[in-house]
Amino acid sequence: MALAERPYGFHFTQLNNDEQENDGTKIFNNLERHLNRAKVKPEVKKNQVLDQFRLIKNRPLLNAFNKNLDKTPLRYFTEYIENYIFDPVVNNNSPEDLLGRFYGEFVSYSGGDGQSLGVVLTPPHITDLFCDLVDLQPDDVVFDPCCGTGGFLIAAMHRMFQAAQSDAQRKHIKQHQIHGIEIREDMFSIATTNMILRGDGQSNLICDDFLSKEAESLQLLGGGVTVGFMNPPYSQAKAKETAHLSELRFILHLLNSVTKGGRAAVIVPVSAMIGKTKDDKIIKHEILKHHTLEGVISLNKNTFYRIGTVPCIAVFTTGESQPKDKLVKFINFEDDGFEVKKHLGLNETERAKDRKQYLLDCWRGNISDVPSKFMVETTIEESDEWLHSFYYYNDELPSGEEFINTVADYLTFEFNMIAHGRGYLFNNSR
């Protein structure tokens, strides 16, 4: 944000280890000027963002001259950001949450703070897929109540910009059609920064607890929320005292916060779609009573690489109760064309685009006679496990290799359920 003040006189060469005003103070003052120039409102929001960055003024190691670098670390980082990061984020309107990627990488090396709090940031190929699954349009109003660093909102804004017909429409999208809530102040500040750098000075984000907000009032955001995206906190309902923090609770509250006939997509652990506890069954009943499940897509178990969560995507139509004869799509998209490479993590292969297109063609009904091992269409009950594996019946005898792989997948699944407090599914008291 300080670099965004370049047209108004700031340049990294001004970071010269001045004894009267250290480099951190110079950067902080320019970032504050940029927030004022962007007209960030209300004042409390601006102060929340500034509070997260005050440390750069006060950390001696960041402001002290480093002989190896021949400059202060802050000068080094500022030069690097200007040369390699600033333009892709600001000038190229990148659909990728680069700040979120950095945050996720940082958390992975900082003792697992994010994971212990249920923080699982969404990969960019998933945020992009969400836009396709709900057929996002430039006149939609998008709401993410657990927006993290802003990944879904950035992807949505980029997609809506591509379909917009004029600069006036793009301005309206920025100012009125992108909304988010984030409870953690650090991630809220990153999300706000993300949106400001993309020209959204108004930044319709608030730092608050989504579950404490009335659904009826949230529906009215931007004139009426039509699309909900969410990656809620995971594994927060391991005890009776925290049962109200289950993923299904977040899902129901999101669905209630979108206007009738809207669309919502969520990414959650597969355990959420099993929903066998008494509380889960009640919530699943409420979901089908007031909303419609369109489908559930089981994802690559490495989608959240290094996190140990096996995820799925559930897509809903809001405000319309589930018809008894409704055929719901259950898709096994574990083979998505992304593979883990040593030292690199999850990487896109040359198969990924074709696999995604095949998924979307099946989802949109463009392909007939889809193999049941990929997609099953069936009516559902609230007592069902809303997953492809529950409805799929394989009458082919497995090979020895397939048997071994299936057993390995099951053991991975059982371990994942136990790790997320679902050991009761296996009569396991651990």
Image: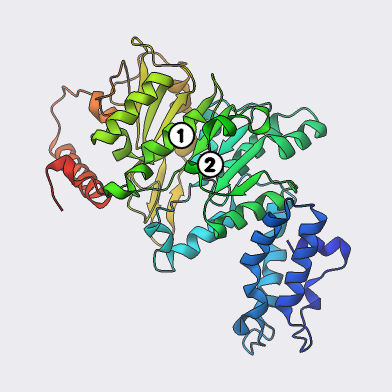
Q: Nearer the viewer, residue 427 or 333?
A: 427
* Residue 262 percent across, percent down from the top left: 55, 23
Give the structural element (helix, strand or loop) at label 1: helix
Residue bearing the label numbered 1: 253
Residue 391 falls left or right of residue 234: left
Give the structural element (helix, strand or loop) at label 2: loop
* Residue 420 percent across, percent down from the top left: 28, 49
Name the mark nearer the viewer: 2 or 1.
Answer: 1
Label 2 to label 1: alpha-carbon separation? 10 Å
Residue bearing the label numbered 2: 145
Residue most toward the right? 8
* Residue 328 percent across, percent down from the top left: 36, 19
Local packing at callout 2 (Cα closer than 10 Å; few below 14, some 14-19, many 20+) is many
Mark 2 and mark 1 residues within 8 Å of each other at the beta carbon: yes
- Where on the picture, by quarter, is residue 286? top left
Q: Earlier in the sequence, mark 2 or mark 1?
A: 2
Give the vertical position of 210 relative to 8 (above or below). above
Mark 1 residue type:
His
Q: Nearer the viewer, residue 411 or 314?
A: 314
